Image (cartoon, rainbow, N blue to C red):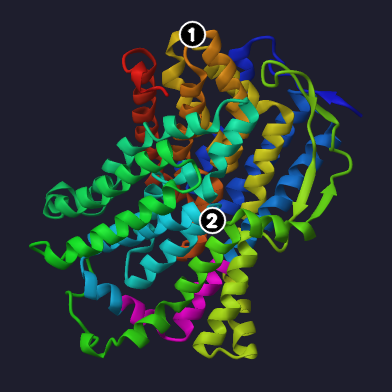
Amino acid sequence: MNWTQVYDPMQNLALSSLLAAIPIIVIFYLLAIRRSPGQIAGALALVSAVLVAIFVYQMPPGLAITSAAMGALYGIFPIFWIVITAIFIYNLTVETGQFQIVKDSIATITDDRRLQALLIAFGFGAFLEGAAGFGTPVAISAGMLVGLGFNPLYAAGLCLIANTAPVAFGGIGIPIIVAGQVTGLDTMKISAMVGRQLPFLSIIIPIWLVVLMSGWKAAKEVLPACLVAGVSFAGVQWFSSNYIGPELPDILSSLACIVSLTIFLKYWKPANIWRFENEPAPTLVADRAALTLGKVLKAWSPFIILTVMVILWGLKPVVASLNTVTINWIVPGLDKLVTQVAPIAKQPVALAALYKINWLSAAGTALFIASILTAAVLGVGPSRFIAVFAKTFKQLLKPLITIPCVLGLAYVMNYSGMSSTLGLFLAGSGSLFPFFSPFLGWLGVFLTGSDTSANALFGNLQSVTGQQIGVDPILTVAGNSSGGVCGKMISPQSIAVATAATGLVGKEGDLFSFTVKHSLVLAVIVGLITYAQAYWLSWMIP
């Protein structure tokens, strides 16, 4: 049966919003207060979302359950497919002993954990975000930090927070491109506006990371390196987003950061080498002279191959070619049966329910091919290859439950209109809306785990509300994307990926508690920036 979304089922937007927020309250409570395992929190939040959709929003049970199932499918593919292939590559390097050489080669740049975090969590993670996105940077960089000797909780938390700076331009700029598509606004102007907001965060994130790791006193010792990393990243991010487009800011900024920081560290060293408490004293076990170029290249080959494959898979001609074998499955019992209406949609539109099985063009497939090439380079035979993959799959059994649950939660909230109710509630803040505008993006990314999805979900609402209050919609749409980056670190999907990569499965609540305060503070900062640009710094709007 056809069903039209209702955004105020209680005839009181505040009360409707409170009921719509029940699944979010459930997952916040279970993760932050009860410290429940992710699979339990995700499953209970999904059940609560289905119940609210059916009994409050009067969504037909079949539609509610089918939308949850569709979200769960997307949780398995492409999201879990990315997670398992990324961690598989890391496990191959560990099993073959090559990761020890990777660690030693990084030590030739710096033994200091603070600086290693800047290079890998901030720089390399941003590169992977720009090239692939969708969980890849956290899965790879967090696993690398653990391999280097980082405390797993800090490795996961630092990578989630570091991933704030690049998210809006992730996956070759797809979040900004989608924002332009759903709003009809100039994509280049949205790109430029985001590029006049996020660089402020990009400068402070490296300092933020180091203070979080070691405290302010120890952070002051590496402040010059933090500024080199942040300023080089922010400068190129601003320039490329304003004068090139949304596709390359992350890749160019991260390369500028890594190269600048590496060169800087050749001529500058901190007064003290900092490591985590209870770590052994800094020593060089390996003979640096024995680290020949050939050995280092072989050890790094999995990540070099991974990078090449991810970039190749991101090229538009390659994607277009690989997508010719995509299986498009129209989901029965959901496709075109839910109608979205104003003010969320410009005109009534029946929502499509199309499950795309892009088995060849998916980022996880690029990583799997990279794992095959890695095995060939490292001399891993078929039987050992299969054994390591089986070990990786066993390692990720709990995330295989968690990730589909949280994606199912997102889909139920989106198809039922619950997400839109929360968005309309925030949009009712009048002249204060520019401040709350980024919190809509924050909410969208928390629910979906994707800045792209948040822009698709709330982009039009941001545009319409901006026009109604007399603020340039370019600013409010950009605010949605910029605010969304702050929600990435606490999205249940991101938390599940990070815990899987660092061996913290079952500790999702601890990681959520670790990141949530940083997420909220950064979102407030973006809100203040957006508000200032709306009324005092309007000359910054392109």
Task: Judge left or right: residue 490 versus residue 209.
Answer: right
User: Is residue 157 in sight in this rendering?
Assistant: no
Measuring 15% from the left and 51% from the top, which residue is drawn there? 224
Prevailing SS of the magenta stretch: helix
Looking at the figure, which quarter contains the C terminus? top left
Measuring 57% from the left and 76% from the top, which residue is drawn there? 371
Looking at the figure, which quarter contains the N terminus? top right
Task: Judge left or right: residue 201 versus residue 426.
Answer: left
Measuring 58% from the left and 25% from the top, which residue is drawn there? 185
Highlighted range, magenta: 85-103
Residue 521: give x, y in percent of width and height.
34, 33
On whether residue 97 falls in the magenta region, the answer is: yes
Q: Which residue lies furthest to the right in this view?
A: 1
Task: Judge left or right: residue 241 versus residue 462.
Answer: left
User: Is residue 38 in sight in this rendering?
Assistant: yes
- The disc labelled 2 sits on which kind of residue? Ala
- The disc labelled 1 sits on which kind of residue? Gly
Q: Residue furthest left?
A: 271
| Residue 482: numbered disc | none
Residue 199: give x, y in percent of width and height.
33, 38
- 498 w.r.t. 514: above or below: below
Q: Name the residue under label 1.
A: 470
Residue 413: give x, y in percent of width and height.
67, 33
Chain-order first, disc 2 or disc 1: 2
Q: Mark 2 points at which residue?
A: 132
Q: Which of 466 and 241 is in front in this view?
A: 241
